[in-house]
Image (spheres, rainbow, N blue to C red):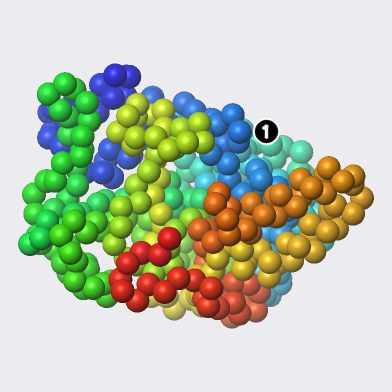
Amino acid sequence: MNALARKIAEHVRVEGPLGVDRYWNFALYDREHGYYARRDPFGRAGDFVTAPEVSQMFGELLGAWIASAWTGLGRPDAFLLVECGPGRGTMMADMLRALRSVAPDCMRAADVRLVETSDRLADEQMQMLGRFDLPIRRVRRIKDLERRPMVVVANELFDAVAVRQYVFDGSDWRERCVSTTDSGRFEFILCEARPQVSDVVRAMGLVEPKAGAVLEVSPARERIAAALAERLTTDGGAGLFIDYGHSRSGYGDTLQAMHGHAFADPLDRPGENDITSHVDFDRIAAPFRASGLYVSPTVTQSDFLLALGLLERAGALGAAHDEKTRTDITGAVQRLAGTGPGDMGQIFKVLCAASRPMSLPPFGLNEAGLPDTTDGTAAD
């Protein structure tokens, strides 16, 4: 049992079983022993690879998207270019390099803000972005951002935010919690009945559950979406959100852990594994719609990147290189937009919200390629 496991076990001993969300927050965000405080999760040497690390093309296309959004907002003289959860700073570096090349006026108007809770990652981001002659500042929370029009992007932000899980036992919804066994290991148990969850199910428009159905909800994710919606509504701007998940609400247990690019037990070695779950884009979109913003359909990453010109960018990038490099670029295109096992094209989804009508993707795209989930079962 590692140090964080001992700390969590003591909380269970004193306070009783923890909800999945509380366990998740211990495991990822404990200031002393949490995953993001201690580990470098990104890349081949870490536990997972994100799209910006697959290829520079991902960030470059998002840079072009930012320039188009800035134009659609009336080309404000000064605006905030915000990334929430910037990782190592790789995506922001690629976006800024693209802006410097294709939209220097947009880049000159931008004040870069990085919303980051991890001090260790914030240091890495500043080292990565130090070569750009721009006002770049890190803030810890969305509410710390200045009141100014903004274009905000977030890749794999919401999946790192905790969920609560409820299990239908045939008559009642009961919260899934984390407790300890007599031998000291962690285990999932069902805690007291939560009858109010039935109201949530009805509000989500889901079918009647069967015994064993699992409902995942994340008030914390919805609070982040609501905070962003308030800023976009009041100050103007556009937000682009990319994450893996399902486009429509449904039942399903999607809690998972990753270690060394392989699935791991979420209850084993807390603080040493990444913990995540699929994002319910229906629930994320709701605060933006409720605020009166223009909200795009939720589309696949494949459709989004292809609409932005992924194939054209790949061709231009490979034209000046040798056959091996072109093969690597083709492989990156497949990973980003493909539909095979391990590819990101279908499982990752894209959503945009804006204070003005926008003609750029994902606006104008439809959901024709997404799985039908009219039975109330989560897609993907």
Expressed as whole percent of the image width and height from the top left, the position of residue 358 reads 62, 77
Residue at left offset 16%, top offset 67%: 198
Residues packed near mark 1 inside 10 Å, few (<14), some (14 to 19) or many (20 plus)? few
Q: Is residue 97 visible?
A: yes
Residue at left offset 19%, top offset 42%: 177
Residue at left offset 17%, top offset 50%: 175
Residue at left offset 35%, top offset 76%: 374
- Compared with 325, 146 (above or below) is below
Q: Is residue 113 visible?
A: no
The residue to which callout 1 is attached is 127
Secondary structure found at label 1: helix
Tell me the kind of residue under disc 1.
Gln
Pick the front one: 15 or 213: 213
* Horizontal side of residue 104 vs 76, given as left or right: right
User: Residue lying furthest front in this view?
Assistant: 340
Expressed as whole percent of the image width and height from the top left, the position of residue 137 reads 61, 44
Expressed as whole percent of the image width and height from the top left, the position of residue 51 reads 61, 49
Expressed as whole percent of the image width and height from the top left, the position of residue 140 reads 47, 43
Pick the front one: 67 or 180: 180
- Quadrant location, the C terminus: bottom left
- Compared with 95, 376 (above or below) is below
* Horizontal side of residue 59 vs 202, given as left or right: right
- Quadrant location, the N terminus: top left
The mark tally for this picture is 1
